[in-house]
Image (tube, rainbow, N blue to C red):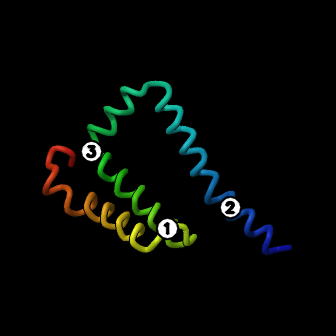
Amino acid sequence: MKALKTWNLLVKIIFLPVIIGAAFLFYKLISNPHEFWLYIESNKLFPRIIAWISLLLGLYGIASRRFAVSTAIFLFSIAFFFAYIGRFIFKNMY
């Protein structure tokens, strides 16, 4: 019983800020999408977003055994490309 209470507290501590952040991000995106896109372009966040999404998708696929190993390796290579190599190829994006 005590472990369940601890788990519920841990879930609230971890997931509540994520949900609040996602709601704030969704609000900013809906309220003024042009300003949101300019923020992403001016801070050059697009390659980081692609790298993080592909990295998290690859980790999810391996952890839950939903993707084949080749698919996970492909996602990891996309993440590696946009995190490390892409800045030498796409100089205007970084």
Q: Is residue 1 left or right of residue 49?
A: right
Residue at x 49% of width, y 67% of height: 67
Amino acid marked by disc 1: Phe
Where residue 6 appears, as percent x and y from the top left, is 75, 69
| Cα–Cα gap, marks 3 and 1 | 30 Å
Where residue 54 appears, as percent x and y from the top left, is 40, 59
Say which residue label 1 marks. 67
Where residue 23 appears, as percent x and y from the top left, is 57, 39
Quarter of the figure with residue 43: top left
Say which residue label 3 marks. 44
Q: Secondary structure at mark 3?
A: loop
Q: Is residue 30 left or right of residue 76?
A: right
The residue mark sitting in front, 2 or 1, is 1
Residue at x 36% of width, y 26% of height: 34
Q: Earlier in the sequence, mark 3 or mark 1?
A: 3
The residue lying toward the viewer, choosing from 42 and 72, is 72
Say which residue label 2 marks. 11
Quick one: label 1, few (<14), some, or many (20+) residues within 10 Å? some
